[in-house]
Image (spheres, rainbow, N blue to C red):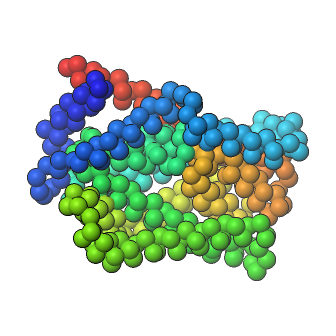
Amino acid sequence: MARTKELERHSLKERASGVGAPERGATHVEDATIEQLAAAAERTDELAVRRQLFGWRELISTAIPIVLIAYFARNVDWSQAFATLRRADPLFLVAALVVYYLSFPVRAIRWARLLREGGARIFGRDLLEILLLGWFVNCLVPAKLGDLYRSYLVKRRFGISLSRTVGVVVAERLLDLFVVFGLLVVDGYVAFGRTILPDLNVLYVSGAALGLVILLGLVGLYAIGPRLGRFFPAEIRRIGRLFREGVLHSFRALPVAGPMTLLVWFLETSRLLLVLFALGLYLPPSQVIFVAVAASLLTTVPLTPAGFGFVEIAMVYVLTTGFGLAQNDAVAVAVLDRAVSVFSVIVVGGVLYLRTEHTERIGVRA
């Protein structure tokens, strides 16, 4: 209860400053149901940060990757894999980290551009820390709850409707998925030609099914949603309208957001290429792109945080069976790439989280 009162006082102070406030219309008063959802998102984050893995969901999300990795790693020669890791060039490793973290300002600017389509006066610099905090939570808990948490932070700090903000985040994720699936199909053809490993068909089937669901969902939002809304109470219709506007209005920014999404994935692929260089390995660009986007697609698996277990196994399989890398080299690539893209985020995000909490406590006391 005290925590909630602190957040409310902090939110009122930020709204009074006018930063990020909507350009038109009165200050939005959130629905009690949405407030409860937001509070649940924050509690989920608190659990993740303190690593209180006593709930059955947390236990399952932790056990699944451990079991998967233990099963598939039983035949790995770990002495050779660690020998490969020990020879990693620190300069290329630092370059991989720099390139990876350059993608966050690009993502923040894109997110701000999408939010401005809904009338919010907000910029990328306002969202960078929030974006990193969302990524931090995604690395600790399953089901992409970090996306809900960063939407909640935007609502709390800038007074923008959570319903609309979640819709914008959904639109942002849809852009990523469209680009990832497109790259997967085109680059898969370039990398493999007409011969595709049978086990990789699951990636194409999953991607195609996901694309179909997305397409049907957009059609439903645009054409069917308003008609179905007549059968629900006014407050539910209002929440649905804000969410629908958040998703659909975001696509007005496609001429800007589309190229920025391609830039994000160029940086993601460059990170993996630099990881390979750090280990003294080389693959053609088409193969690097395929591994990067395939791994990214698997991070959407909601069972584990950041796709743990699924991503590492898929990377090793594609690198060895698909592209002929030695097993110890493939394992080293997977370990080092995940250290850059996940474990570094846990460290950086953890520092940001602790600093943010400390700053907010001081602000509330003041």
What percent of the width, then of the height, locates residue 356?
Answer: 36, 30
At 59% from the left and 60% from the top, the residue drawn is 297
At 43% from the left and 39% from the top, the residue drawn is 133
At 53% from the left and 41% from the top, the residue drawn is 141
- The answer to whether any part of residue 204 appears in the image is yes
In the image, residue 225 sits, relative to residue 136, either above or below, namely below
Q: Foreground: 49 or 237? A: 237
In the displayed structure image, the side of residue 297 where residue 359 appears, left or right = left
Which quadrant of the rendered structure holds the N terminus?
top left
- The answer to whether any part of residue 277 appears in the image is no
Name which quarter of the figure residue 42 lies in.
top left
Name which quarter of the figure residue 172 lies in.
bottom left
Q: Foreground: 252 or 299? A: 299
What percent of the width, then of the height, locates residue 185?
Answer: 63, 74
In the image, residue 211 sits, relative to residue 18, either above or below, namely below
Residue lying farthest left? Answer: 26
Which quadrant of the rendered structure holds the C terminus?
top left
Q: Foreground: 139 or 277? A: 139
In the image, residue 133 sits, relative to residue 115, either above or below, namely above
What percent of the width, then of the height, locates residue 296?
Answer: 59, 57
In the image, residue 366 sits, relative to residue 136, either above or below, namely above
At 75% from the left and 78% from the top, the residue drawn is 193
What percent of the width, then of the height, locates residue 337?
Answer: 66, 46
